[in-house]
Amino acid sequence: MTDTSNRSSGQAEFSTPALIRIVKWTGLVLFGPFYFLFIAFIPVLCQSRRGFRGWYWRTIKRACSRLMWLLSTRVEMGAAARDALRHDENSIIVINHRSHLDGFALMDALPDEKWITFGAKKELCDAALLRRGFKSAGLVEIDRKSGKLALETLSDAVKAMPARRSLVLFPEGTRVGTETLGEFKAGAVLVARETGRVIRPIVILNSDRLLPGGKRLPKSGSIRIEVLEPFLCDPNGSADADVARLRSAMIEVFEGRQQAI
């Protein structure tokens, strides 16, 4: 469900004055580490409390929104797309990957009613403090050394999730700096076929222009998020054919919207 009705014609031109950006960056540098530690320590104190995960989810989501504000980065999503995610259930979200801003931008744009969690490589959870926080937030660890084990881990995690929570996967596997989408891995399709969930494709635009590879701080500007109609795998076809159809649908939106920016 692509929705351009609320799309700003000045998307690329949005910017924050340099002085305000400096003040925001200073605040991020001075207070950001303490805020991160506060969020990371919350599970140590509150994990056993009833309703903790829902409260913790909203805390993380608000933190991402504050980070986008401090970075002077506006995240745009149409009203129809937001409403579609508000009622989205039994899905696996597939999103292209352009920069380090992508996950934060998606969290910022999501309605509160929609819960997500990410699949992340196991190495990110090696630190004890991060492991506790990630586990409490529902992050799914992926051991990329074994494709079969990774698929089993993802499928089991998805089967255990409530309907309104969706696993988010980046099918390209890493950030892509090409003018179009990179090649897709089959993981999301295989998990969808195994669990019976639909795939909800999401296309992110302009994040790589704000934060190119190798840069530490993003430019001021807007990121656009487009939400596509649910994608159904074909039980009578091959997984490779599903991957090709999914990538084609996302490329059509990505290239069409990219030209308009």
Image (spheres, rainbow, N blue to C red):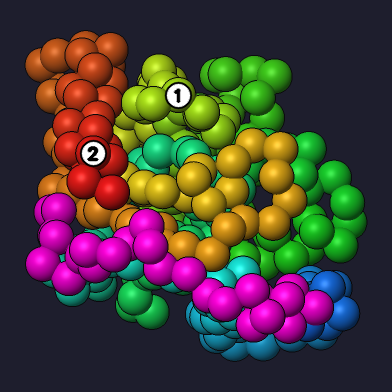
The answer to which of marks 2 and 1 sits earlier in the sequence is 1
Instruction: Please tell me the numbered disc located at residue 178.
Output: 1
Boundaries of the magenta span = 1-26
Q: Is residue 236 visible?
A: yes
Q: Nearer the viewer, mark 2 or mark 1?
A: 2
Element class at badge 2: helix
Q: In the shown orientation, is residue 83 left or right of residue 171?
A: left
What amino acid type should be assigned to the residue bearing mark 1?
A: Thr
Whether residue 18 appears in magenta in the rendering, the answer is: yes
Q: Residue at x 68, y 80 (%)?
A: 19
Q: Quadrant of residue 79?
A: bottom left
Name the residue carrying label 2: 259
Element class at badge 1: loop
Q: Position of residue 249 (x, y in %)?
A: 18, 31
Q: Is residue 118 visible?
A: no
Above-or-below relation of 243 to 72? above
Q: Residue at x 86, y 62 (%)?
A: 129
Instruction: Please tell me the numbered disc located at residue 140.
Output: none
Q: Residue at x 67, y 87 (%)?
A: 49
Q: Position of residue 166 (x, y in %)?
A: 39, 55
Question: How many residues crowd around disc 2 within 10 Å: few (fewer than 14), some, or many (20 or more)?
Answer: few
Q: Position of residue 244 (x, y in %)?
A: 24, 17
Find the distance from the CA under tag 2 to the CA under tag 1: 14 Å
Above-or-below relation of 204 to 82? above
Q: In the shown orientation, is residue 151 left or right of residue 23?
A: left
Q: Position of residue 1 (x, y in %)?
A: 13, 54
Q: Residue at x 59, y 48 (%)?
A: 211
